[in-house]
Amino acid sequence: MPKASDIMTKEVITVTKDTSIRELAQLLLQKSINGTPVVDDLKSVIGVVCESDLVEFNKPLHIPTVFVILDSIIPIENPWRLHKDFKRISATKVGDIYSHPAMVVEPDTDVTEIARIMSDNKFYTIPVVQDDKLVGVIGKVDIVKSLTLL
């Protein structure tokens, strides 16, 4: 059975929390990739940002449902959702939209386990780390390519 090290992309493109959303979009398009690890100043993986995060970023603002009683406005929904939506629509940097903490695997992880992680969690860009150092990345296309190794 193939392992992560057999299918991972070793030349990993990364971004930081300070990368602009415009730069991220251009990078994903130019490199034809779905997502990329987000790293800190020490190059440790702190999260992942994907096309789906950019799609979410462009989603319209949800107006919360409220009711009024005796001149009081009472939200029916969780007020943190509105806060999260305002943060999303005002985002300018990767740090505002990326998913964290990152779901990572090690080089000896079976491809079947990686496929399960992707399927169960809907994470389609998985960093590969060894001794807390980024050594590769696996995307959906890598899982599909692994079928040719069987």
Image (cartoon, rainbow, N blue to C red):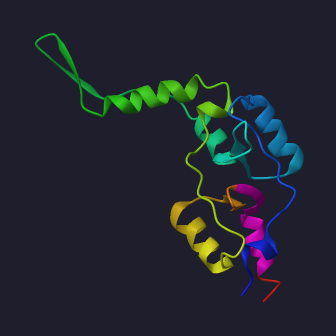
Q: Residue furthest front?
A: 131
- Residue 57, percent from left and from top: 60, 34
Assess whether residue 55 is covered by the magenta stretch.
no
- Residue 32, percent from left and from top: 85, 51
The quadrant of the image that shows the N terminus is: bottom right
| Nearer the observer, 135 or 83 | 135
Assess whether residue 136 is covered by the magenta stretch.
yes
- Residue 28, percent from left and from top: 80, 45
Going by the image, does 16 lie left or right of 12? left
**Number of on-image labels:** 0
- Quarter where residue 142 is shown: bottom right
User: Residue sitting at 74 percent across and 44 percent down?
Assistant: 43
| Nearer the observer, 132 or 50 | 132
User: Residue sitting at 74 percent across and 63 percent down?
Assistant: 138
| Nearer the observer, 1 or 133 | 133
- Quarter where residue 21 is shown: top right
User: 98 above or below 89?
Assistant: below
User: Residue sitting at 62 percent across and 42 percent down?
Assistant: 53
Q: Is residue 112 visible?
A: yes
Q: Is residue 58 visible?
A: no
User: 35 above or below 56?
Assistant: below
Q: Residue furthest top?
A: 71
Q: Residue furthest left?
A: 70
Which portion, as a residue range, is magenta? 133-146
- Residue 40, percent from left and from top: 69, 38
User: 78 above or below 145?
Assistant: above
User: Residue sitting at 78 percent across and 89 percent down?
Assistant: 150
